[in-house]
Image (cartoon, rainbow, N blue to C red):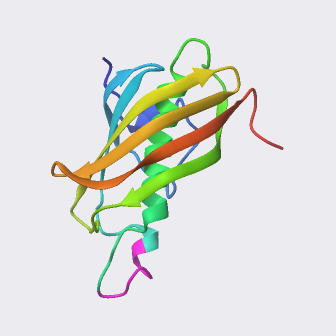
Amino acid sequence: MTAMDRDAIQAIIPHRDPFLFVDEIVELEPGVRAHGRWTIRGDEWFLQGHFPGNPIVPGVVMVEAMAQTAAVCALTHDDHKGKFGVFAGIDGVKFRRIVRPGDVLDMIITVDRLRGRIGRVNGETTVGGEAAVEGTLTFGLLEEPPA
């Protein structure tokens, strides 16, 4: 199991601020499992309008945070290093809890399939041990970024 900071994450996936939604990888077993963590500071761009005076992290942003954690898991596997991940499907996503500034999201990703050009993971995001988001994410693995 390997831990990673933001610099190490950015060496694997192309996401950058303001669209990097993983602060650290707490645990990693390449191609098998990853545990990412993201602290909601309160100054994120999407909170300004969602909602003024009552900031709530949008569900789609939390799904993206799970996807970024999944990308680190997939792209650290020897068979997929240097590739580029893109969404291919989002299934069975449930939002279980409102997430606000100050919350720390723990994104737990377990690989269901990672062969050829397709990967599928089961993801669960918790805040303080309480379920916030869960679902299955499918992604394509490309040799280079789309043109």
Q: Residue 124, located in which quarter of the rendered image?
A: top left
Out of 10 and 125, give the one closest to the viewer: 125
Judged by its main secondary structure, the magenta piece is loop
Out of 25 and 31, give the one closest to the viewer: 31
Residue 6 x, y percent position in the rendering: 40, 38
Q: Quadrant of the C terminus?
A: top right
The magenta span reads 47-53
Judged left or right of residue 130, residue 116 is right
Q: Return the residue found at the far top.
A: 78
Judged left or right of residue 112, residue 133 is left
Question: In the displayed structure, would residue 79 be above or below residue 58?
Answer: above
Question: In the displayed structure, would residue 21 be above or below residue 50?
Answer: above
Residue at the image point whose x is 30% and y is 88% from the top: 53
Q: Does the segment drawn in magenta span residue 120?
A: no
Question: In the displayed structure, would residue 62 be above or below residue 58?
Answer: above
| Residue 140 visible in the picture | yes
Q: Does the segment drawn in magenta span residue 49?
A: yes
Q: Residue 58, located in which quarter of the rendered image?
A: bottom left
Residue at the image point whose x is 52% and y is 30% from the top: 11
Q: Return the residue found at the far bottom.
A: 53
Q: Quadrant of the N terminus?
A: top left
Residue at the image point whose x is 79% and y is 41% from the top: 146
Residue 40 x, y percent position in the rendering: 30, 60
Judged left or right of residue 116, residue 33 is left
Q: Return the residue found at the far front.
A: 92
| Residue 10 visible in the picture | no
Residue 72 x, y percent position in the rendering: 48, 31
